Image: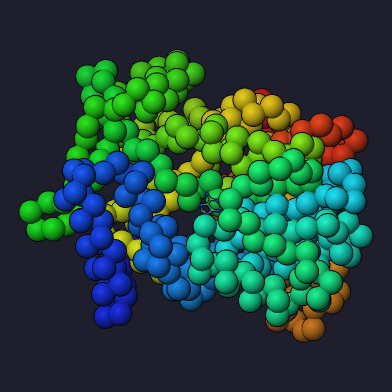
Amino acid sequence: MDTSLPEPSADEAAHSARLADAIRQEIAATGPISFARFMERCLYAPGLGYYSAGRLKFGKGGDFITAPELGSLFARCVARALAPAVRACGDAAVWFELGGGSGAFARDCLLELQALQALPRHYWLLEPSADLRERQRATLRAALPAELFVRCAWLDRPPQHPWSGVLFANEVLDALPVTRFTVASGEVFEEHVTTAANDAFAASNRPADPLVAGAVRHLQRHLEHEFADGYRSEVLPQLPWWLEAITGEQARGATLFIDYGYVRHQYYLPERTDGTLLCHYRHRAHANPFILPGLQDITASVDFTALAEAGLGAGFELVAYAFQSEFLIATGLDAAFTAARAAAPDELARYALAQQVKYLTLPGEMGERFQAMLFARDLDAEAVFPALLAVDRSTRL
Ligand SMILES: C[S@@+](CC[C@H](N)C(=O)[O-])C[C@H]1O[C@@H](n2cnc3c(N)ncnc32)[C@H](O)[C@@H]1O
C-alpha cells in the first residue's frame, strides 16, 4: 500500500476544509457520530462529498478505475448476459442501473442491447450524486442516438410501482456507508468519529446498539468462532433493508451485482484484524479515512455471503455467484473481443483491447478480486441463464 500521497491543490484543500468544518459542527452539536455517518458525509454531503462534488473520480486522471471505464467490453458482456432476461420480461422491460458513475456503462450497454435487439423500454438510473447525474446525462446525450437517449430516465428514489426487467450495479455496494465494529472482552463496540485536540478526526468506540451487536453476533454464529479481542472489521446491518427498498417492486426479472469482495469466511479471516476499509486518492490506496475528507474515496469490500442472505431474504432465487473472469467468459467476452478487434482502427486500439481483457480477467487484477452475484425473480433461470448456471460457485458461500 502506497502512503506517499500527492498534495491536494489549494482549491482542493479549501474544499476539503469546508466539508471537515461541516462534519466538526455536526459532532459539536450531537456528540461523536457513527463511522457510517462520517463515511456518508465524506462521500455524499451535498456539493461537498466525494461523489457529490465536481472533481474527476474515475479513470486515469481520477482516483481509481472501474471496469466500465476501461473500455466497452465489460458493458457488452453484461448486456449479453442480461439480454435474455430483458426479452423474457416482454415489451415493458426496464433496465435499472444503480450508481451509473460517468455514464460509460449505460452508453456501451444500450448500444450493445440495440445490436442484440434486446432494448428495454426504459433505462432508469438511480444516482445519489447530483453532479454525477448531470455527467451521465451529458455523456448519454452526446453519445447515444436520439431513439436510445429518450429511453433514459433518472429516478429520485427507488421505483414505487411494480416493474419488470433487470437491475444492475457495478461497484455500488462497496460505496455504501459501512458500520465499523470492534470486539473487546466479548462485547461489541461500534466505531464513532470525534474530533481530537488538534481538530483532526479520530475514532472513538461506543457500546454497539442492538442492531449492530446483533449483526456481529450473526457473523460469529455463522463463522462458528468468536472474534478475538481487538478484532476490527466492517458490517452492513442495513443491507437486507436496502436491497428490499431497491428491489421491493421488481415483480419479475434479474438483479446483478458486481463488486470486489469475499465469501464470509474469507472476509472475516481471524488474521484480517483490521477489516477491508480502503481509501483511494489519485490511484494511491491507503487505510486512513480521517484525512482528505471529500477528496478521497472510502470503500469496503463486499461480504457476498451477506448479499446472498439479503437476496434470499428478499425472495430472490440465487442463480449464480462467480468470479468476474468466469462471468465475463461465460457471457461472451471472446465474441465481444473478436468483434471489437475487427472494428479497431489500428494496432494501438487492438493492443488496448488486449490490455482490457487482461485487466478484466487476470486473477491479480479484476478477474478474481471482483465477483458477480446474479439473482432472479419469477424467471426460468435454467432457460434464461444456462451459461451462468454452469460457472456458479455459490457452494463457496
Ligand atoms: C465506485 S462508483 C461506481 C460507478 C460505476 N458503476 C462504475 O462502475 O464506473 C459508485 C457509484 O455508486 C453510486 N452510489 C452510491 N451509493 C448509492 C446508492 N445507495 N444508490 C445508488 N447509487 C449509489 C455513487 O454515487 C457512484 O456513482
Which quarter of the frame holds ligand 1?
Answer: bottom right
Residue 364: x percent and y percent? 56, 52
Residue 81: x percent and y percent? 80, 49
Query: If the image is split into quadrants, where does the N terminus sit?
Result: bottom left
Farthest front residue?
Answer: 161
Which quadrant of the structure image shows residue 269? top left
Which quadrant of the structure image shows residue 89? top right
Q: Residue at x 49, y 18 (%)?
A: 222
Which quadrant of the structure image shows residue 391? top right
Q: Residue at x 40, y 54 (%)?
A: 298
Q: How is the image coloured?
A: rainbow
Number of marks in picture: 0
Q: Nearer the viewer, residue 110 or 37?
A: 37
On the question of residue 345 being in view, the answer is yes
Q: Is residue 246 left or right of residue 222?
A: right
Farthest left residue?
Answer: 197
Vertically, is 16 above or below 297? below
Vertically, is 143 above or below 177? below
Q: Is residue 139 left or right of residue 389?
A: left
Q: Residue at x 12, y 51 (%)?
A: 196
On the question of residue 81 being in view, the answer is no
Residue 53: x percent and y percent? 42, 69
Q: Residue at x 45, y 73 (%)?
A: 54
Q: Is residue 103 left or right of residue 89?
A: left
Q: Is residue 379 left or right of residue 227?
A: right
Query: If the image is split into quadrants, where does the C terminus sit?
Result: top right
